[in-house]
Image (spheres, helix red, strand yellow):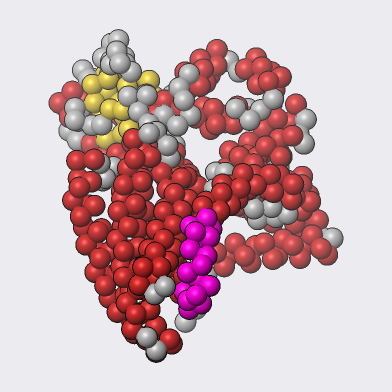
Amino acid sequence: MSIPLTSELKKEGRLTALRDALDSGTLRQAHRMVNSLHPAEIAALLESLPPRQREVVWEFVDPELEGSVLVELSDGVRQSLIEGMETEELVAAAEGMEVDDLADLVGDLPETVTLQLLRSMDQQDRERLRTVLAWPEDSAGGLMNTDTVSVRADVTLEVVLRYLRMRGELPPRTDSLFVVDRTDRYLGTITLTQIITGDPERTVGETLDTEAPRIEPQTPAQEVSQLFQDRDLVSAAVVGSDGKLLGRITIDDVVDVIREEAEHSVFSMAGLRDEEDLFAGIIPSTRRRLLWLGINLVTAFLAAAVVRTFEGTIEKVAALAALMPIVASMGGIAGTQTVTLIVRGLALGQVQWSNARWLLFKEIAVGGLNGAIWAVVVGAVAVLWFDTWRIAAIIAASMLINLLAAATVGVLVPLALRRLQIDPALSAGVILTTFTDCIGFATLLGLAALFLV
């Protein structure tokens, strides 16, 4: 019985086969391999290659696929490829793209290319693009596609079916039609299933869903993705303040938002820019990471200053030097667990100031219970190591206090940063580490100074 390969293994196999073809000089085979893939798969392959091989493989991509591949690439990789393309090539790649995809690409194109592209478009497509570009990229208006199919409420299902047959083709991912009045004011939706299986003599108005979600164009993309997750939507209407239908958002755009949010959280925790190019040059990568490392160095100096205050205590009780990393490490890990939960809850809209007190007491209780359990374990090990219960009691008390502090900081800091309009994923980790290191060292060395020296 054969076991199906996972997508990761398949991707690794394609990369290996492609590299083998490049190394062996069989460029025709490599060309066929590249263009047999979906544009998203080509983008994934390009992002998995060093810059020199990436440029070679990009030359293999058929011109009619270039636009679709560019949209799927991360910002850094896309920009590097665009810089090496001629104006005519860029215009040709952008022609024929869906409006929402084109809106994502236009921001990275040189101004001369953008102007030439706008001149090559017909008036209707130009207006559609301007409508999408009028809204921020991370809003419902920036996500929407203006290519919609709408019908009137007073026509019968039989008339709608005849219209669809005559139209011949629907926009991708169309699961329902939007119902509007004579002034294009949005009334609701009717699903394709209802149109096909319903009584042909019934009117659209008798069948439409007036409770279908309507999204305002200024709605943040994060809220849009949450709505799609909660309601299991495939598409939804974007409706202006005047009630008129502006466009629609489809699930493929929402999946991109969800992926970008996940990447943002992961990269921000490490102080990296969103969609960091894994194969970026040494100098650009160094420059991007330099500032964050400097910030962390400042926080490390703060912890070192606390330790230096108790330099005399450490000299007299050398055992403390071996125990200090344990207290700091346990506090940092416990705090990171709490921060991760709170940041995720904030992102999902589950955590607000109204339930923060309950969460704070809960995390303090968890931190206290964990602290007590591991304090006993560490205290027992300290007795075995140093043959004195006084050091064991001090390390146990320090760990308990630091875990309680870590739980408190882990809840309050992300909430405070959100209130100050600062991304908790970006800053909470550094602040947490500073607090737990300083509190852990100060508690351990302070108690030692009181009871051992």
- Residue drawn at point x = 29 percent, y = 61 percent: 404
Observer able to see residue 38: no
Residue extending farthest right: 25
The image quadrant that residue 274 belongs to is top right
Q: Which of 218 and 92 is in front in this view?
A: 218
User: Percent from the top left, x then y, of residue 243?
Assistant: 28, 16
Residue 200 in the figure: left or right of residue 20: left
**Relative to 361, does residue 78 appear above or below in the rendering?**
above
Residue 269 in the figure: left or right of residue 370: right
Confirm whether the magenta stretch covers residue 224.
no
Confirm whether the magenta stretch covers residue 307.
yes
Residue extending farthest top: 183
Q: Which of 330 and 253 is in front in this view?
A: 330
Q: Nearer the viewer, residue 220 or 286?
A: 286
- Residue drawn at point x = 35 percent, y = 72 percent: 451
Start-end of magenta stretch: 304-320
Q: Nearer the viewer, residue 302 or 410?
A: 302
The image quadrant that residue 76 belongs to is top right
Chief SS of the magenta region: helix
User: Percent from the top left, x then y, of residue 121?
Assistant: 60, 18
**Relative to 424, does residue 107 appear above or below in the rendering?**
above
Observer able to see residue 447: yes
Q: Quadrant of the C terminus?
A: bottom left
Residue 212 in the figure: left or right of residue 320: left
